[in-house]
Image (cartoon, grey):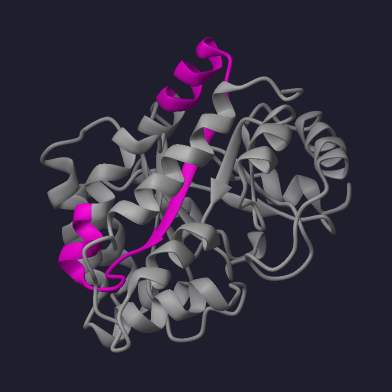
Amino acid sequence: MEETRIDRRFAALKEQGRAAFVAFVTAGDPDLQTSLELMKKLPEAGADIIELGMPFSDPMADGPAVQYSSQRALKAGQTMAKTLQMVREFRQTDDDTPIVLMGYYNPVYVYPGDKFLEDAREAGVDGLIIVDLPPETDDELCIPAREKGINFIRLATPTTDEKRLPSVLQNASGFLYYVSIAGVTGTTAPDPRKVHEEVARIKRSTGLPVAVGFGVRTRQQVRELAAGCDGIVVGSAIVGAIADTLDDSGAAQEDTIERPLALVRELSQGLREPASS
């Protein structure tokens, strides 16, 4: 593959000596305009990479916070076409920040899949994380995505053993997303020591950057986990901050954009501090 924005961003951060802050938000949550405005402001707040969730009615790997964010987005009328349009509008003012679409295969398949890759590439999408497509289905989307110049980012978990790891890594690119806990997103806190051990084990088999996510919600966690990986992914805490601002009908309020941005600023500062502080 040719070098992508993701490759360039991780290389630049490696020179700076720090891990990437990867911020997850769900496209269209709580509505299209609010979501787009928040997305545009994430890089200035400290997001090095943006993961944009593709709303889906049955997000089985996600905890309540992300599930509810998908429900809100779908209720507000979010579609895959609108999600790609968000990326296009973001690219009008930011051609550097990598954007990764994260979610499930169903919305991609019904788009349909071959047209999706063309439109995603044209919109400015850099990577895909499709949590329910295992390596055995790489011909379905992973390899075609790579041929379009879109990184296909694979998940590894605490149960990905030495026998399984080569399959996970085989066609992965951009970075590897290490799921730091067994379970769904945002439910329990990761153990930094165990995470560092697992990331070190994975790095012995790949030169890809490894980003750690699931259950990260405090500045101290960010600081501690970053000492042993190349990136920190925060999602449930950010979409939870959005949810906390909404009125009883789920509509955005004055602080719906600022509160998650303040959280991103706070947490991303953990990457600029020594782990012992």
- Image quadrant containing the C terminus: top right
Pinpoint residue 15: horizontal percent, then vertical percent: 52, 10
At x 35%, y 69%, the residue is 245
Q: Is residue 61 left or right of residue 181?
A: left
Residue range highlighted in magenta: 8-37
Pinpoint residue 226: horizontal percent, then vertical percent: 67, 32
- Image quadrant containing the N terminus: top left
Residue 146 in sight from this viewpoint: no
Pinpoint residue 203: horizontal percent, then vertical percent: 76, 31
Residue 17 in sight from this viewpoint: yes
At x 56%, y 47%, the residue is 233
Q: Is residue 276 left or right of residue 213?
A: right
Most foreground residue, 135 or 7: 7
At x 52%, y 73%, the residue is 65
212 relative to 217, above or below? above
Q: Is residue 140 left or right of residue 158?
A: left
| In the image, residue 23 lies in the stretch drawn in magenta | yes
| In the image, residue 263 lies in the stretch drawn in magenta | no
Q: Is residue 4 left or right of residue 179?
A: left
The image quarter in which residue 19 lies: top right
At x 39%, y 84%, the residue is 71
138 relative to 48, above or below? below
Most foreground residue, 86 or 25: 25
